[in-house]
Image (cartoon, rainbow, N blue to C red):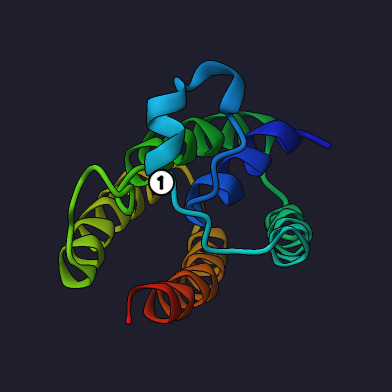
């Protein structure tokens, strides 16, 4: 179960849910947007974890991949917060910029097949996020 907690953080971030209430102020909590229900989140989390396990990363690659995921998804975490005031198109633009930087950073860490798997996994997650974003912001 390498990087289980890191993968947990990734799904939390990508689904724009706020499970870090202990370290957030009440004011920040008022700005958080929860796109996925608890059941949807749990299903996405398990799916993501299983997909990453299928990548069969070495310990070194797993650590580096996890570090890059954590760094980039933390930047994605607050894109849809109410206090940002971003439009849906701005959120998508900024998300895609961060997503492209993530891909650029993880590519040297992964072999060709792992990178292909990474792109597939992230594509599915991105579609799920954008679908929920459409529902919440339209």
Q: Position of residue 122 (x, y in %)?
A: 49, 65
Q: Quadrant of residue 89 in the image? A: bottom left
Q: Position of residue 26 (x, y in %)?
A: 46, 25
Please give the residue where the numbered disc 1 appears in the rendered image.
106
Residue sitting at x 75%, y 37%: 4
Residue sitting at x 33%, y 74%: 137
Q: Position of residue 9 (x, y in %)?
A: 59, 38
Q: Is residue 11 above or below residue 36?
A: above
Q: Is residue 45 above or below residue 120?
A: above
Q: Is residue 41 left or right of residue 60?
A: right
- SS class, disc 1: helix
- Image quadrant holding the N terminus, namely top right
Q: Residue furthest right?
A: 1
Residue sitting at x 53%, y 68%: 125
Residue nearest the observer in this picture, 50 or 5: 5
Q: Position of residue 33 (x, y in %)?
A: 45, 53
Residue nearest the observer in this picture, 130 or 25: 25
Residue sitting at x 57%, y 36%: 61
Residue nearest the observer in this picture, 33 or 89: 33
Q: Quadrant of residue 2 in the image? A: top right
Residue nearest the observer in this picture, 111 or 91: 91
């Amino acid at each position: 179960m390498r990087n289980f907690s890191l993968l947990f953080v990734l799904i939390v971030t990508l689904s724009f849910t706020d499970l870090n209430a202990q370290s957030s102020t009440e004011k920040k909590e008022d700005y958080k947007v929860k796109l996925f229900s608890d059941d949807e989140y749990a299903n996405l989390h398990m799916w993501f974890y299983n997909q990453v396990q299928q990548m069969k990363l070495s310990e070194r690659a797993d650590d580096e991949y996890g570090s890059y995921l954590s760094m980039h998804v933390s930047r994605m975490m607050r894109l849809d917060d109410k206090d940002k005031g971003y439009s849906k198109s701005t959120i998508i633009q900024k998300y895609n910029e961060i997503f492209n930087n993530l891909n650029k950073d993880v590519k040297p860490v992964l072999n060709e097949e792992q990178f292909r798997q990474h792109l597939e996994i992230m594509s599915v997650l991105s579609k799920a996020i954008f679908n929920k974003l459409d529902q919440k912001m339209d």
